[in-house]
Image (spheres, grey):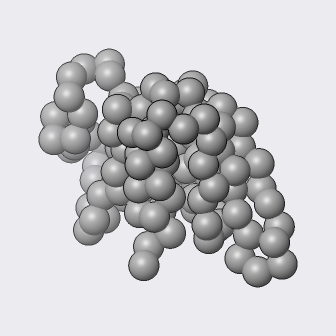
Amino acid sequence: MDPLVNALNTILAHEGRRKVECIITPASGLVGRVLRLIQSKGYVGEIEYIDDGRQGKFRVQLFGRINSCEAVRPRYKTRVSEMEKWEKRFLPSRNMGFVILSTHKGIMDHVQAKEENIGGVVLAYVY
């Protein structure tokens, strides 16, 4: 099972139940970087790593601002010129939410990737 899919499904399920926090397990580097990006956009609050002696966990504070967040499978490669296509496909309208990309400069959203003029692999979307 994909840890990113599991993490985003956990967040979405807890948001739907109006919980104030959720525990995401297993913790991975990719999940941590994606959560930090979502946090920097203001969709979630504090993120805490819990070392349980096994795989680790993330405790995420929820604000109730996420309408949808899903991982994109299969992971599509994209260029800067194709970014508009992915925005139209996954986001409900302009300037609402963001598409998460994995680039050679790290995990970033589609707006930052356009500014830096780099492509990458589409991982997920949040709005």
Picture quadrant where residue 44 is located: top right
Image location (x, y in percent) of residue 60: 65, 44
The residue shown at (41%, 55%) is: 9
Q: Nearer the viewer, residue 29 or 60?
A: 60
The residue shown at (62%, 41%) is: 21
Determine whether 96 is above or below 22 in the image.
above
Q: Is residue 110 left or right of residue 28?
A: left
Q: How many marks?
A: 0
The answer to whether residue 117 of the structure is visible from this angle is no
Image location (x, y in percent) of residue 85: 16, 40
Picture quadrant where residue 115 is located: top left
Image location (x, y in percent) of residue 124: 37, 51
Q: Please state, as top left, top right, bottom left or bottom right, where the C terminus lies in the image.
A: top left
Given the current orientation, which residue lies at the most extreme top position? 95
The residue shown at (77%, 56%) is: 49
The answer to whether residue 54 of the structure is visible from this angle is yes
Determine whether 109 is above or below 71 in the image.
above
The residue shown at (70%, 63%) is: 57
Image location (x, y in percent) of residue 90: 22, 41
Determine whether 60 is above or below 64 in the image.
below
Determine whether 36 is above or below 78 in the image.
above
Q: Is residue 70 left or right of residue 60?
A: left
Q: Please state, as top left, top right, bottom left or bottom right, where the N terminus lies in the image.
A: bottom left
Q: Nearer the viewer, residue 33 or 63?
A: 63
Q: Is residue 102 left or right of residue 59?
A: left
